[in-house]
Image (cartoon, rainbow, N blue to C red):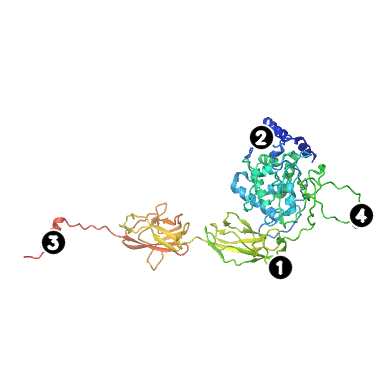
Amino acid sequence: MAAQFGRLRKGAVNTTVAAVAVAALAASQAPGVTTDDAGRQVATGTQPSPDTAAEDSATGNSPYYTDLPPLNSPNPSPSADTPVTPGTSEAGIPATVLDAYKKAETALREAKPGCNLPWQLLAAIGKVESGQARGGRVDANGTTISRILGPQLNGNGFANIGDTDNGAYDGDSSYDRAVGPMQFIPSTWEWAGRDGNGDGKRDPNNVYDAALAAGHYLCRFGWDLSTQGDLDRAILSYNNSQDYLNLVMRWLEYYRKGTHEIPDGTGTLPSDGSDDSAGASPTPTAPVTPTTPAKPATPTTPSSPRPGGDGGSGSPAPTPPGTTPPPTTTPPTPTDTVHHLQDAGTAKLTAMAGDTFTERISTRAETQAGKAVAKVRVRFTITGDTDATFSTGEKYATALTDSTGRVVAPALKAGEDTGEFVVRAVVVGRAVAGLDYTATVTERAADTLTRTSETALTCTPGGEFADQVEVKATYKGAVADKVAATATLVKSADDPAENDKGPYFKDADGKTVRTLTGLTTDAKGLLKLPKLYADDTTGTFLLRVNTAGGATLTVELKVAAADTSPSPTPSESESGSASASPTA
């Protein structure tokens, strides 16, 4: 990628003052420049500017991997209910890394819905920047096992960015370096960093934090990434190079065609770094001894490792003098020892539509011998045709096992869809069988119905009732909202059949109706019935209201002729009283 580093060398200057001057000049001459929420200027055109200051990109325009996607398309993404059949290693994304990308997409969908950030874009950038966190070499919390550092941005073949963090993020108090799986420079991370795993910290070496930060960074100007123009601008703002844009787009399209999850630490390490011309040394693969070499290998002088290590090509950070180098083999992580998942006493999962499940899923990670495994990340995913979610509002959740190997999923929240669905628990970063939990959502119900008024309901033949019937539904003392109900004018207390005479409702055409269906209580549990009318039949009649869950209320209706007898006058009352009095 000579163009990339020709641009870096052209944009690199020997002093910070000169870099600022170049940035100011670019800002004053380029109309397609905007300012982000930290006051930094970013070129918004689809073509990179060779004079744009490196500080204005997420990565400081640091080097990156240049491996191209395979020619063959990856296998289609498997559904949640279908076992994964591994395809090419390039198509697979390490489990924790993939989880971080998808979690970031979900968070951005809520925080910035107009951005339309696809997780595949984060995967493409993560592939190019760090080879998916160096093949998924992360712990259960998502933190890289060893730091991923770019080269020292000292102007020697790279941009010149003096130290901005006193070495807090990159361990270098002289110059900045790109840090972590998404390769943020410290000055950008200072304002763009996010806490993606909820541990209260913003760590550029944590893939959850870095993925969420990258998502917000790409969405910061209100760009709509579903449009090509804004997508190009966002990618160029991450690393201002047309070659970089083209490469990220190729990986984006590759991942859009399908990918699958592979265990952590098993990803393919990229081999080509864009800084090869600068003498970088990519992470070596395990040596292979040919059985019959065609000719003796020509010895070569090993290239010296680039200062700062990885820099997008996978080289580890240098070992300080006087310290023991780390072992070449990594000891098994807790995740590596998990043999299976075991139910940890989860009770029956049942809830009414709209309610939160009182019982929560509990799972235990165990070795083959049944020993508990702590600090293992378990992912819970809701599958099936349901609108149920976790209490977080998402369809999946991840959590760490405790010292007893146990992990409890967030509470489930039932939607309006009734029936069964499945929650699958799997170990993140470990290809062991998942554990399924069946949950059931029942329809909304009420166990009690009461009238909201004690006024007697009376009417004259052929007239209409002055008061409408209103009832309130409750379930275990709480308001029962959105509960289905029916109302029927029945023949008697012992005969629930629809009456053929007496009071009635009217439909939209004014026709007589004595049974109403499709009724629903409101948010306060109230249900107000339409106006009632009476035919010419007099007597006492019954209205019965029933709800899902078995609540029943019977209301008495009276139809009687008006009392036409005259009231006694005052003189008649006095006369009557006098005649009734005993004589002297």
Real-space CA distance between mark 1 and mark 4, rounded to the nearest whole angstrom: 43 Å
Give the residue at mark 4.
Answer: 293
Q: Earlier in the sequence, mark 4 or mark 2?
A: 2
Which mark is first along the chain, 4 or 1? 4
Residue 307, percent from left and from top:
78, 45
| Residue 575 on image: x %, y % | 12, 59
* Residue that label 3 marks: 577
Mark 1–mark 3 Cα distance, whole angstroms, equals 103 Å
Q: Quadrant of the C terminus?
A: bottom left
Q: Which mark is nearer the camera, 1 or 3?
A: 1
How far apart in space, not on screen, are marks 1 and 2 (Cα)? 59 Å
How crowded pointer 4 is (Cα within 10 Å; few <14, some 14-19, many 20+) is rated as few
- Along the horizontal axis of the image, is 300 left or right of 235? right
For the residue labelled by badge 4, is the local secondary structure a helix, a strand or a loop? loop
Whole-percent x, y for residue 484 in the image: 47, 59
Q: For the residue marked with disc 4, what is the amino acid?
A: Pro
Helix, strand or loop at mark 3: helix
Residues at discs 4 and 2 in contact (Cβ within 8 Å): no
**What residue is disc 1 on?**
368
Query: Which residue is denoted by mark 2 in the rendering?
Result: 33
**Relative to 42, is 478 above or below?**
below
